[in-house]
Image (tube, rainbow, N blue to C red):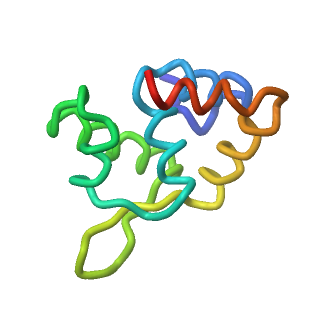
Amino acid sequence: MTEKKDECGVKYTLDVLEDRWQPRIIFWLGFRPFTIEELHQLLPDLTDVALKEEITSLQNLRIVNPVVDEENKYSLTDDGNDLRNMVLTKGNNNEFYNLAKM
């Protein structure tokens, strides 16, 4: 069984970006840390359970980290910021924004 960390970078990136919700979460967390409740307000079609599962998946991929504070916020890791910036600078910045709004 091949783990994500053993796959090539392009396939790994495409797997994340092809997910319905992960690009949207990455987009919003690029602005500032958010709590689960704040992310749910930004992504109302995503259930609380599904949002927590997506956050856990992004943590396992080392894209998102919890912020150690009393508010239980989440932020992007350096790799998460790099991924977000790569997508934002690939040509059309509106594509990522439109993805976040879908």
Q: Is residue 40 left or right of residue 7?
A: left
* Residue 96 placement: quadrant: top right
Q: Is residue 48 left or right of residue 32?
A: left
Residue 70 location in percent, x, y?
23, 81
Position of 98 relative to 56 (above/below): above
Q: Residue at image x 46%, y 21%?
A: 19
Residue 36 location in percent, x, y?
25, 53
Q: Residue at image x 72%, y 28%?
A: 8
Q: How many marks?
A: 0
Residue 101 location in percent, x, y?
46, 28
Q: Nearer the viewer, residue 64 or 4?
A: 64
Q: Residue at image x 60%, y 50%?
A: 80
Q: Nearer the viewer, residue 3 or 16?
A: 16
Q: Nearer the viewer, residue 84 or 57?
A: 84
Residue 30 location in percent, x, y?
56, 53
Considering the image in quadrants, where does the C terminus appear?
Answer: top left
Position of 92 relative to 82 (above/below): above
Position of 10 relative to 61 (above/below): above
Q: Residue at image x 26%, y 69%?
A: 72
